Image: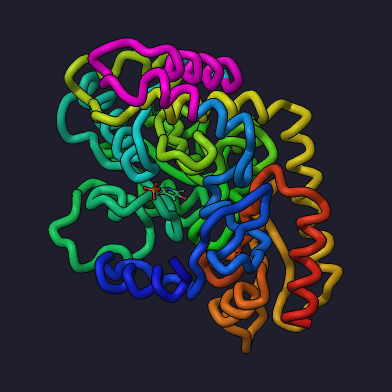
Amino acid sequence: MTSSEIKALTGQYIMNTYGRFPVAIDHGQGATLYDPEGNAYIDFTSGIGVCDLGYGYQPWVDAIAAQAKKLGHVSNLFYTEPSAKLAEILCQRTGESCVFFANGGGEANEGMIKLARKYSFDKYGKGRSTIITLNNSFHGRTITTLMATGQEVFHNYFFPFTEGFRYADANDLASLEAAAGDDVCAVMMELVQGEGGVLPLDKEYVQAVKKLCEERDWLLLIDEVQTGVGRTGSLFAFQQYGVLPDVVSFAKGIAGGLPMSGIMANEKCRNVLGPGTHATTFGANPVCAAAGLVVQETLSDAFLEEVQAKGEYLRERIEALDLPCFGKTRGLGLMIGIEVKEGFNKSEIAGKLIDSGLLVLTAGPGMRLLPPLVITREEMDQGLAIMKKTLG
Ligand SMILES: *Cc1c(COP(=O)(O)O)cnc(C)c1O
């Protein structure tokens, strides 16, 4: 099919819930994508932080094919090897104790919220179920995670929402104290607010929140759906912040492009969700887990150092371009935000770059870059050249 045929068919038969760019993607290799007509696009998006190994990565393709041939799905009523191995690696590399596998980020966060509320219910009974989240956060699109999201625009249309969330300002301990109370069971946050605009939290703040959580027996819930799995230059961002969350969620990059997510809990929370309290049909799917194992094998410590170096390179070069529309950059690893100067429109900039062969994202008030973690210097330089030509 041609691009225009695909667009027409989509318009006719798929619900119009996405503001799509006018591009159809057919295939990819490395960090380069191609439309059906063969036009190339340098990818600074990874399918929104998902395709950490880029496209057509041979070990990933082979592992999926081999596992699909052996066993595609069997349900969590039976044991399978790939998910057990993946859980072992995740725990060994992070210091967490156990994993529950799900399918998407919002669903993982639902599990994290359920765990926090049950932890408190088991210990203190009813009435201690409020979770403090941060303004400008993003935690998902389910009825509950919309409410966990600290942005008014998401609290619309779908009433009634789930009760039990209060909001505090990021990097502001006094604001967190103001939201505290006897009804609180947990604090939930992203360490780099992603959809909110690539805003990293301060290390001192996060460590102070961890201390407060310990004093009051609140659980510290970290949403690493976007920051996790190497994106920030460490396997999880919390490892750079020097805290071990009670529960942490992951999704996007975990299986390099197949739908998979989950939560990891520390020893204290190991037995909170017992048999019958939480489940999902597709969770721990063996094909997704086999793909996740390839991601873990690829993301060695040396590879993660390279992610840091690539992120620094890209930020430095973008600032050196000194484009009229861009200000400072910020972020961690290959999770990069670019300030858009007043008088310029982020969506217009994204549209122009995409027209010129460079895929980029927007977030909050500026641009957001999430290139595949395997992106080469050559591909980054091609992307930078497109930026310069298009916006210079
Ligand atoms: C993307 C994202 C989610 C939602 O994940 P889905 O897979 O779309 O449900 C939740 N939290 C954060 C931080 C995210 O970036």
Which residue sits at x=56%, y=54%? 27
Q: Please identify the residue farthest to the right as the structure is shown.
A: 320
Query: Which image quadrant for residue 390?
Result: bottom right
Q: Relative to residue 336, is residue 9 drawn left or right?
A: left
Q: Relative to residue 170, is residue 151 drawn left or right?
A: left
Q: Is residue 68 magenta?
A: yes
| Above or below 279: residue 164 | below
| Above or below 132: residue 355 | below
Which residue sits at x=56%, y=45%? 51
Q: Nearer the viewer, residue 243 or 333?
A: 333
Color encoding of the figure: rainbow
- Give coordinates of residue 141: x percent, y percent: 31, 54
Q: Nearer the viewer, residue 15 or 314?
A: 15
Query: Which image quadrant for residue 339?
Result: bottom right
- Give coordinates of residue 358: x percent, y percent: 66, 68
Query: Is residue 243 visible in the rendered structure shown here?
Result: no
In the rendered image, the quadrant that contains the C terminus is bottom right
Magenta span dominant secondary structure: helix
Residues in magenta, as a range? 65-94
Q: Nearer the viewer, residue 371 or 194?
A: 371
Which residue sits at x=51%, y=48%? 173
Q: Please identify the residue farthest to the front as the structure is shown.
A: 1
Query: Is residue 293 visible in the rendered structure shown here?
Result: yes
